[in-house]
Image (spheres, rainbow, N blue to C red):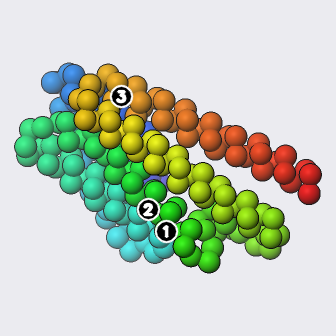
């Protein structure tokens, strides 16, 4: 439980921790701590099953590889590529599910409501498509911030704006879903 909490906090704080390692040389040791957290996450996920678990394992492997490469090559800028990998992985997960009989959002919805009506099934497919669009947009901007090599802009987008957009999308979708439910 503690490891899960530490991993979650580290992932949320990732952009700010990267900013610290890039702008404050005395904070470069944080990279080793992040690598250790990612390696521990790999260890805990090694036997997990399901598409989401595999994506989380992949992200933990990539995160640990980026941290270790940053330490070995003494290039903290490699850490900036993690948000792009996260967006690409989530796009792949959500997008691939659109070619399956049950898109990811529908699978998640059926955990709470196993007997979804046809209208709700169509809605979940549309929501999955919207998330794919979000990951394309967010990943593109994350890539741009890496290529521009401006740590302040990178941190602003990946540590603030993208989280706000994601929260707005989640909140807006929840409100829309409640409204649709009332109309049904």
Q: Are marks 3 and 1 in contact (CB under 8 Å)?
A: no
Say left or right for 43 vs 21: right
User: Residue 83: x and y, percent?
Assistant: 36, 44
Which one is in front, 115 or 149? 149
Looking at the image, residue 41 lies above or below residue 99: above
Looking at the image, residue 43 lies above or below residue 2: below
Element at label 1: helix
Q: Pointer 1: residues within 10 angstroms few (<14), some, or many (20+)?
A: few
The residue under label 2 is 92
Q: Earlier in the sequence, mark 3 or mark 2?
A: 2
User: Residue 148: x and y, percent?
Assistant: 26, 29
Q: Are marks 1 and 2 in contact (CB under 8 Å)?
A: yes
Say left or right for 122 vs 103: right
Between the C-alphas of marks 3 and 1, the distance is 29 Å
Element at label 2: helix
Asked if residue 79 can be seen in this view, the reply is yes
Element at label 3: helix
Which one is in front, 111 or 171? 171
Q: Quadrant of residue 124?
A: bottom right
Q: Quadrant of residue 146?
A: top left
The residue under label 3 is 155
Q: Pointer 3: residues within 10 angstroms few (<14), some, or many (20+)?
A: many
Between the C-alphas of marks 3 and 2, the distance is 24 Å
Q: Quadrant of the C terminus?
A: bottom right
């Amino acid at each position: 439980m503690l490891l899960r909490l530490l991993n979650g906090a580290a992932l949320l704080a990732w952009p700010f921790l990267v900013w610290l390692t890039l702008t404050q040389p005395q904070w470069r040791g944080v990279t080793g701590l992040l690598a250790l957290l990612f390696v521990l996450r790999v260890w805990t996920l090694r036997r997990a099953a399901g598409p989401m678990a595999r994506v989380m394992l992949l992200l933990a492997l990539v995160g640990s590889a980026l941290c270790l490469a940053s330490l070995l090559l003494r290039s903290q800028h490699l850490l900036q590529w993690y948000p792009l990998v996260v967006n690409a992985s989530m796009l792949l997960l959500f997008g691939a599910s659109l070619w399956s009989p049950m898109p990811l959002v529908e699978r998640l919805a059926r955990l709470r409501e196993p007997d979804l009506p046809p209208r709700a099934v169509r809605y979940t497919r549309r929501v999955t498509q919207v998330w794919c669009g979000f990951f394309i947009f967010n990943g593109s901007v994350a890539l741009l911030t890496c290529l521009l090599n401006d740590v302040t802009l990178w941190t602003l987008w990946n540590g603030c704006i993208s989280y706000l957009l994601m929260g707005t999308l989640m909140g807006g979708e929840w409100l829309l879903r409640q409204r649709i439910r009332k109309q049904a």
